[in-house]
């Protein structure tokens, strides 16, 4: 094995293993934390590490999106969901045997799917890194608004419909039915 | 390596922040005086005795705001790659984004119409 590493590769390797270790530890905390709020905070750490991986892969824009949407949005949403349903400091009861079995089954199924998917898929690393764009945001934009072959302008417009659907869905699901009754009664 | 140059300041800031928090909390544990009388351990709200339980569920309207924030957050994410290449796109890019934003504006007016952003 070649052990003469140049400094750039060394920093890269150190950064990668630091991030990998942090995300694994934080992921374990997410699963094992008794207090659900601590699990949410640990999830934020996992997602921040994910952004770090994107930076290591030179996808700075994707890392920014990860921070903006997942860390800044989804985790806040999870915290709100926790606050809505129970108190923040509530300690989860140990699950019943049936739920444990179900959890074991589904996590094993997911593990099997992931392992099969990773082993079956061929990752052409060299070709991707060779044609990796210098400015990711510009490349994404060009691909997104490209109406030629291989462009994504239709999916781009469909995304706005998807977001519209989620706006309406959010209102319909979370609308306070009590207020509606009050309105009809008066 | 320029990536190190870009992200080293961020790392230093994170490290300094963590250090300040650890040092300040550690110092207060180490050299602080600990008095554990009954009055001292009592919870307080600006000198007033607390009213009720602090552990109650939060109204659903906060969740509505959060979920709508995320949706428009994602919209901004799509605006960004469009904005950086706007110069080279011309009229077509402008119209595409106009359609995109128009569809989402419909959602915004739907929200306003349903009164989801009203606080009471």
Image (cartoon, rainbow, N blue to C red):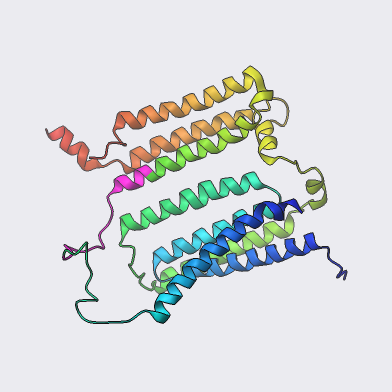
Give the answer, above or below, for where B81 lies relative to A96.
above
Q: Is residue B60 magenta?
A: yes
Camera-nearest residue between A26 and A183: A26
Q: For residue B27, which quarter of the picture?
A: bottom left
- Residue drawn where x is 26% and y is 40% of the image: B119
Residue A95 on image: x %, y %: 39, 71
Give the answer, above or below, for where B113 lies relative to B65.
above
In the picture as drawn, the residue positioned furthest to the top comes out as B91
Residue A19 on image: x %, y %: 63, 63
Residue A156 on image: x %, y %: 59, 31
Camera-nearest residue between B31 and A162: B31
- Residue drawn where x is 57% and y is 64% of the image: B15
Residue B117 on image: x %, y %: 31, 36
Left or right of A11? Residue A32 is: left
Q: Quadrant of the C terminus of chain A?
A: top left
Q: Is residue A106 visible?
A: no
Q: Which residues are magenta?
A: B49-65
Left or right of B59? Residue A60 is: right
- Residue drawn where x is 50% and y is 58% of the image: A44
Q: Quadrant of the N terminus of chain A?
A: bottom right
Q: For residue A99, which quarter of the picture?
A: bottom left
Q: Is residue B18 magenta?
A: no
Left or right of B112? Residue B40 is: left
- Residue drawn where x is 48% and y is 72% of the image: B23
Give the answer, above or below, for where A92 lies relative to A71.
below
| Majority secondary structure in the magenta region | loop
Q: Is residue A50 visible?
A: yes
């Amino acid at each position: 094995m070649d052990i003469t590493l140049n400094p750039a590769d060394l920093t890269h390797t150190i950064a990668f293993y630091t991030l990998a270790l942090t995300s694994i530890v934080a992921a374990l905390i997410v699963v094992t934390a008794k207090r659900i709020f601590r699990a949410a905070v640990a999830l934020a750490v996992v997602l921040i590490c994910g952004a770090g991986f994107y930076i290591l892969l030179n996808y700075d824009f994707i890392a920014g999106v990860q921070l903006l949407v997942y860390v800044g949005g989804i985790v806040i949403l999870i915290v709100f969901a926790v606050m809505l349903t129970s108190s923040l400091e509530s300690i989860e009861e140990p699950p019943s045997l049936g739920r444990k079995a179900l959890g074991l089954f589904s996590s094993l199924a997911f593990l099997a799917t992931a392992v099969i998917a990773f082993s079956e898929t061929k990752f052409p690393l060299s070709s991707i890194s060779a044609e990796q764009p210098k400015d990711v945001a510009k490349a994404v934009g060009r691909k997104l608004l490209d109406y030629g072959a291989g462009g994504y302008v239709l999916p781009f417009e469909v995304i706005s419909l998807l977001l519209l659907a989620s706006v309406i869905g959010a209102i319909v699901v979370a609308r306070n039915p009590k207020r509606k009754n009050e309105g009809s009664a008066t | 390596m320029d990536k190190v140059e870009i992200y080293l300041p961020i790392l230093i800031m994170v490290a300094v922040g963590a250090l300040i928090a650890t040092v300040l909390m550690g110092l207060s544990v180490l050299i602080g005086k600990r008095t554990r009388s009954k009055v001292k351990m009592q919870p307080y709200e600006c000198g007033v005795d607390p009213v009720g339980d602090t552990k109650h569920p939060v109204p659903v309207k906060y969740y509505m705001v959060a979920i709508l924030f995320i949706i428009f957050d994602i919209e901004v994410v799509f605006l960004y790659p469009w904005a950086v290449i706007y110069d080279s796109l011309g009229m077509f890019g402008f119209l595409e984004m106009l359609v995109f934003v128009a569809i989402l504006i419909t959602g915004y007016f739907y929200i306003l119409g349903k009164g989801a952003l009203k606080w009471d």
